[in-house]
């Protein structure tokens, strides 16, 4: 190697030496940057952790997993949660075909169906089954819950909600409003803006007259509607929204919210999406979820746990629920039960819940679930709950007023 060659190599070696030092220099800057970033993020991390722990501390009748999902929805991760749920539910649809194992449930009740006015036995009516090959007793109304003067204030019918899923069971409850009053009870987290005077549970005064209780609608943020109770607004009411309206006497109506509805000055209004039955007919667009009209999480076509409520031509209230319903089959089920107007309530296994309560001579209250597959305990609404719900209370006699 000549001297000239040696000189020619020096710039390359110098360059390689400089390059060898650059990563070390960059690495020290990067570590310093990350340290400062970590320090800056500490307050946000602490705040998020504190918020999450508070959510778990107020779990009520919900599991840690359910509260974690609720916390994520409330902290800008709603789209991610919805995406995961859509994937999960789309791969866990009810099987087609088959039939119910063990047949239909038999309601436990100490009540009888009311006799006709001429003293003859009550005419047993029924929800005409939607399945083409109905089971024995499918859709027949049975006495439900505690007797009031010997007769049933509520009735229940069990049936399959469509002709495709033979193993799916639905329950429909029909409630006589002449004997009961309805109360909208706020939860500790929904509708928010608490604390509320009702205290998240049925009052001690009304507990002896508690007949049943059931879930309300979506989270307020997802309901596309409002919430008003005793003159206090948790979320503004939307004109045209499907509305559960409780009047001053405790009577309940299901309607599309209008200025005329507002003029009636109801005690409580809980809105959720739009009507699914109106004028006794299924509304147009049940198969179109444009703009998340029927919900953002699983939309309208997936068969999941759903619940709904309607009112028939006689003013009786109808509650329906099942583990495998689309928006259309929920609407068809309520229409078949006699609803002239109906709306969807909450969905998903965690939230669909109807409990009927029985009172013992000692004053104890025990609950029974409408459907055995409902995830929440039968005592759910005898304790404070995180979600708002509807209580069915026996109307007091004149002597009790």
Image (cartoon, rainbow, N blue to C red):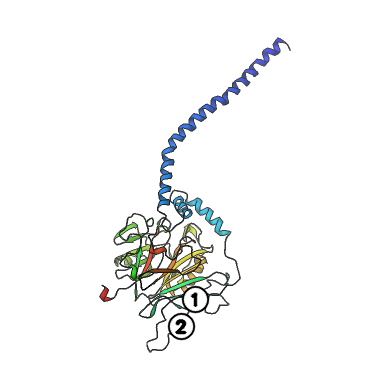
- In the image, taking residue 251 as reference, residue 166 lies left or right, namely right
**Which residue is at 53% across, 75% downward?**
104
For the N terminus, give its image quadrant.
Answer: top right
Query: Residue 6 appears at what percent x and percent y?
Result: 69, 13
Residue for point 38% across, 80% down: 151
Residue 343 at least partly seen: no
What residue did someone put label 1 on? 106
Q: Of the numbered discs in the image, which one, if any, rests on residue 187?
A: none
Q: Secondary structure at mark 1?
A: loop
Q: Quadrant of the C terminus?
A: bottom left
Give whichever of discs 1 and 2 has the lower sequence position.
1
Q: Nearer the viewer, residue 348 or 65?
A: 65
Q: Is residue 232 above or below residue 254?
A: above
The CA distance from mark 1 to mark 2 is: 15 Å
**Residue 323, position as x, y percentages in the image:** 52, 66
Q: Residue at x 67, y 12 (%)?
A: 7
| Image side of residue 300 versus residue 379, left or right | right
Q: Judge from the rendering whether residue 302 lies leftward or rightward of residue 247; answer left or right.
A: right
Q: Are marks 1 and 2 in contact (CB under 8 Å)?
A: no
Q: How would you rate the neighbour count of disc 2 (Cα within 10 Å): few for under 14, some for 14-19, many for 20 or more?
A: few
Q: Does the rendering let one see residue 391?
A: yes
Residue at the farthest top position: 3
Q: Quadrant of residue 168?
A: bottom right
Q: Nearer the viewer, residue 239 or 133?
A: 133
Q: Secondary structure at mark 2?
A: loop
Q: In the rendering, at what x and y percent does residue 84 appear? A: 53, 53
Q: Residues within 10 Å of mark 1 (few under 14, many from 20)?
A: few
Of badges 1 and 2, the one in the foreground is 1
The residue most toward the front is: 362
Say which residue label 2 marks.
124
Q: Position of residue 110 (x, y in %)?
A: 41, 78
Q: Nearer the viewer, residue 346 or 197?
A: 197
């Amino acid at each position: 190697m000549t001297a000239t060659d040696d000189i020619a190599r020096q710039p390359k070696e110098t360059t390689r030496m400089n390059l060898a030092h650059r990563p070390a220099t960059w690495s020290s800057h990067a570590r310093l940057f990350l340290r400062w970033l970590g320090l800056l993020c500490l307050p946000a991390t602490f705040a998020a952790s504190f918020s999450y722990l508070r959510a778990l501390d107020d779990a009520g009748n919900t599991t840690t997993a359910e509260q974690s999902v609720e916390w994520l929805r409330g902290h800008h991760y709603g789209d991610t949660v919805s995406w995961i749920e859509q994937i999960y539910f789309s791969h866990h649809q009810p099987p087609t075909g088959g039939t119910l194992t063990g047949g239909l449930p038999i309601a436990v009740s100490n009540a009888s169906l009311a006799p006709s006015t001429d003293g003859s036995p009550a005419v047993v009516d029924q929800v005409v089954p939607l399945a083409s090959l109905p089971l024995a007793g499918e859709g027949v109304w049975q006495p439900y819950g505690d007797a009031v003067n010997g007769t049933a204030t509520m009735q229940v019918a069990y049936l399959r909600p469509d002709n495709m899923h033979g193993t799916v069971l639905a329950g429909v409850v029909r409630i006589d409003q002449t004997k009961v009053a309805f109360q909208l009870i706020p939860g500790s987290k929904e509708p928010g803006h608490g604390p509320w005077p009702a205290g998240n549970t049925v009052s001690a005064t009304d507990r002896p007259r508690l007949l049943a209780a059931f879930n309300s609608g979506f989270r307020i943020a997802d309901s596309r509607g409002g919430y008003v109770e005793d003159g206090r607004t948790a979320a503004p009411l939307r004109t045209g929204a499907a509305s559960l309206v409780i009047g001053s006497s405790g009577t309940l109506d299901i309607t599309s919210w209008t200025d005329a509805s507002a003029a009636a000055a109801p005690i409580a209004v809980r809105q959720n999406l739009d009507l699914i039955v109106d004028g006794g007919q299924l509304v147009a667009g049940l198969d179109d979820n444009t703009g998340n009209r029927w919900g953002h999480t699983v939309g309208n076509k997936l068969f999941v746990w759903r619940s709904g409520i309607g009112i028939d031509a006689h003013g009786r209230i109808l509650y329906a629920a099942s583990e495998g319903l689309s928006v259309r089959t929920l609407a068809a089920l309520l229409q078949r039960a006699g609803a002239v107007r109906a709306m969807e309530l909450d969905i998903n296994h965690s939230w669909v819940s109807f409990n009927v309560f029985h009172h013992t001579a000692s004053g104890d209250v025990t609950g029974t679930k409408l459907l055995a597959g409902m995830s929440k305990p039968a005592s759910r609404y005898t304790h404070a709950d995180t979600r708002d719900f509807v209580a069915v209370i026996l109307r007091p006699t004149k002597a009790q007023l």
